[in-house]
Image (cartoon, helix red, strand yellow):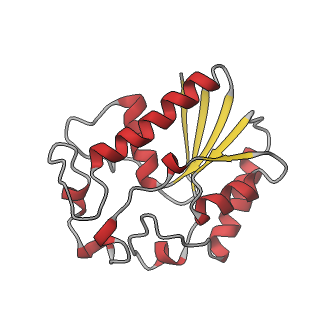
């Protein structure tokens, strides 16, 4: 399987540095422009399947990128549920602890990191089984991409998942 993973385009909450989680925020004008630019970059790629998070920002990104293709929406590709932290400014909560696989903190409402990774991993296992030797495009979110990366590359020894640049419309590639 040849997997291309794309982060959704920019939203107003990205600009204001708010935690989106599973809040259904749409792309802003810059985000739409970013996706249209990405579409030009990906137009030579012949994806046999397109799978997206059903959250609006990812859904809009997938629809712009793949206007004439069938898109499969999978709830397991949704961003991590940030629960009580959704809508806060990023600096208003302890992101290091929230993303620590070693600490594996259980929150009142937010999704536990191991539960989140398990959800995304199950999706990837299903995709690998169903679409062997195919070119797949996944449209998702930063957290989901972190989980995808650990599926292929393992948990970082230093527990730091933010070594990659997670700009909007960034492309990540995996070949299995």
Along the viewing direction, whichever of 2 and 83 lies nearer the viewer: 83
Q: Quadrant of residue 147?
A: top left
Left or right: residue 146 compared with residue 54: left
What x and y, as percent, mark residue 175?
Answer: 55, 25
Name the residue: 59% across, 33% down. 3
**Across the whole image, how many numbered discs are drawn on residues?**
0
Q: Is residue 96 above or below residue 51?
A: below
What residue is shown at x 58% (from left), y 47% (from top)? 74
Residue 7 showing in the rendered view: yes
Above or below residue 26? Residue 22 is above
Is 74 placed above or below 45 here? below
Which image quadrant for residue 117? top left
Residue 3 in the figure: left or right of residue 79: right
Q: Is residue 91 left or right of residue 73?
A: left
Q: Could you tell me which residue is drawn at 36 percent across and 38 percent down? A: 118
Percent position (x, y) of residue 146? 40, 45
The location of residue 37, given as percent across then percent down, is 72, 59
> Could you say which is closer to the camera, residue 55 or residue 3?
55
- Location of the N terminus by quadrant is top right
Residue 26 screen position, x and y as percent: 60, 72
Asked if residue 148 can be seen in this view, the reply is no
Q: Residue furthest left?
A: 103
Q: Residue furthest right?
A: 68
Residue in the image at 40% along x and 75% along y: 17
Residue placed most toward the observer, 98 or 164 = 98
């Amino acid at each position: 399987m040849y997997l291309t993973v794309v982060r959704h385009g920019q939203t107003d909450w990205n600009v204001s540095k708010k935690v989106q989680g599973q809040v259904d925020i749409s792309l802003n004008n810059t985000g739409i422009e970013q996706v249209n630019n990405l579409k030009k970059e990906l137009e030579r790629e012949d994806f046999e399947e397109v799978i997206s998070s059903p959250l609006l920002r990812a859904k809009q990104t997938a629809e712009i990128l793949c206007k004439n293709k069938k898109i499969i929406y999978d709830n397991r590709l949704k961003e991590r549920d940030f629960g009580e932290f959704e809508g806060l400014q990023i600096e208003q909560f302890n992101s290091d602890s929230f993303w620590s696989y070693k600490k594996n903190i259980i929150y009142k409402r937010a999704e536990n990191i191991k539960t989140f990774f398990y959800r995304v991993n199950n999706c990837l296992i299903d995709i690998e089984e169903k679409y062997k030797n195919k070119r797949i495009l996944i449209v998702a979110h930063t957290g989901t991409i972190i989980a995808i990366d650990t599926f292929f590359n393992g948990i970082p020894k230093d527990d730091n998942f933010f070594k990659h640049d997670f700009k909007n419309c960034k492309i990540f590639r995996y070949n299995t």
